[in-house]
Image (cartoon, helix red, strand yellow):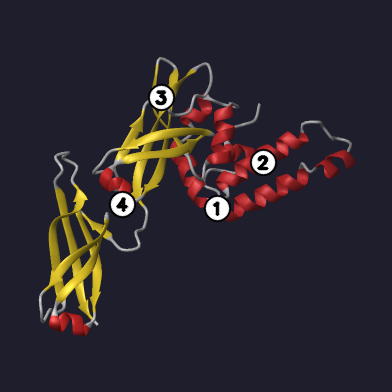
Amino acid sequence: MPSLDLYKTLGVETSATAGQIRTAFRRLVKLHHPDVTMHQGDGEPNQSDRLKEIGDAYKILGNPEKRREYDRQNGGVLAFLSGSAVAREWADMFGSLQPTVLHSNNGEVDLDISLTHEISLEIADSGGVEEIVSYGKTIRVNIPAGTREGDNIRLKKMGYHGGPFTKRGDLTLTVKFKPHETFSVVGDDLHAELLIPKEIARRGGKIGIPTLSGTRTIELPPDSKNGTMRFPGCGLQKKNGDGERGALVFKISIC
């Protein structure tokens, strides 16, 4: 059974530097390479498994961010699930999905998945259905109208199932807004810059302004100056569910 003490796998202390970990990895790869072991008359059929174990350990301990996360986990669930598919999949998928054990009851481990999902401002404003892929499974997620960046959407029993002795965890999506070509978000308000040619600013008249739902025509007063133009009720839908909206705020730049 492969060891899930990754430091032990590489033969280093938990306080080892990045350089010491790299050196240990290279030494072990050379030591367990099939050409070397067969030459010494000590070749075993499981040498490739040993090399994979060493490589998997280095993928995590050789990456500062993944190493910090491994240290933070402190071996709790990994010791319980030693040698399981959970640990192997964690090593393979660490970059995009970060399984986190929240608690353990009566010997059962709840293994939850947390991931970040980007949505457009249009979906955040009006709501809609998004599709995500978790462990090869496509899941349709309802995004409520008025969703904000940083909101968490929890999907019960959509997390990882580690085996017969574990209870399926939950999947938690943390919402992030996709960059928008026009607007930035401040609370419930949408902010943008509006460039107005000098001649139009001087004489005034009808101009088009962008909104999330398309272009809207307004009447620009004559002799308009640099400043701020605010349109209440034209921003993002608020989270209270009664249809109230923030403001649409333009920084006016006469050019």
Amino acid type assigned to the residue bearing label 1 in the image: Thr
Q: Quick check: 10 above or below 231? A: above
Q: CA distance from mark 3 to mark 4?
A: 28 Å
Give the quadrant of residue 48.
top right
- Closest to the camera, between mark 1 and mark 3, is 3
- Of 190 and 187, nearer the camera is 190
State the SS at label 4. helix
Give the quadrant of residue 52.
top right
State the SS at label 1. loop
Percent coordinates x, y for residue 162 in the rendering:
52, 24
* Label 1 environment density (alpha carbons within 10 Å; few <14, some 14–19, many ≥20): few
Residue underneath mark 4: 121
Residue underneath mark 1: 17
Residue underneath mark 3: 157
Q: CA distance from mark 1 to mark 3?
A: 39 Å
- Closest to the camera, between mark 4 and mark 1, is 4
Residue underneath mark 2: 54
Q: Earlier in the sequence, mark 3 or mark 4?
A: 4
